[in-house]
Image: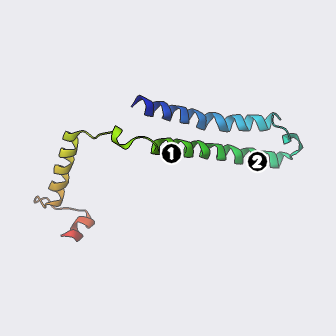
Amino acid sequence: MAGVMQKFLVASMFMWMLPIAILYAFNHDLLPGSTTLSPHSLTLLSGFLAVVSVNVVIVFYICLALKEPVDKHKPDASFVAEAKDSVKKLTSGSGVPSTDPALKKQE
């Protein structure tokens, strides 16, 4: 669980730091060629790249999450049993009238 939290915190930090660094670099002329752009173009380009950087971090985090081993996380057996019993009670018609239209269609 600590590894998952660590990945989440690192991804969250990058989602904050990268856009701010990109905006800072464009606004303080730290990137070559940014001095030749008009202020309007500079604002649009820096904002667009900041948004793209956040999306790249999100895609990277999703890829890391998909590479997690599936058998690593096992649900608690008592929780699963209670959940199944709860679902059976709701669908078996235990005498309590249901307000859910989907359940009424099944009957």
As drawn, the residue found furthest toward the left would be 95
At which x and y percent is residue 71? 33, 41
Q: Residue at x 59, y 41 (%)?
A: 57
At which x and y percent is residue 19? 67, 39
Q: Quadrant of residue 95?
A: bottom left
Q: Is residue 97 above or below residue 6?
A: below
Q: Is residue 104 above or below residue 40?
A: below
Indicate left or right for 2 with 78 as reference: right
Q: Residue at x 78, y 38 (%)?
A: 26
Nearer to us in this view, 69 or 51 = 69
Q: Quadrant of residue 60?
A: top right
At which x and y percent is residue 52? 65, 47
Would you name the residue on which mark 1 appears?
62
Q: Quadrant of residue 99?
A: bottom left
Specify few, some or many for label 2: CA neighbours under 10 Å numbering under 14, 14-19, or 20 or more: some
Would you name the residue on which mark 2 appears?
45
Kindly indicate whether the residue at mark 2 contacts the one at mark 1 (C-beta within 8 angstroms). no
Q: Secondary structure at mark 1?
A: helix
Q: Which quadrant would the C terminus be assigned to in this image?
A: bottom left
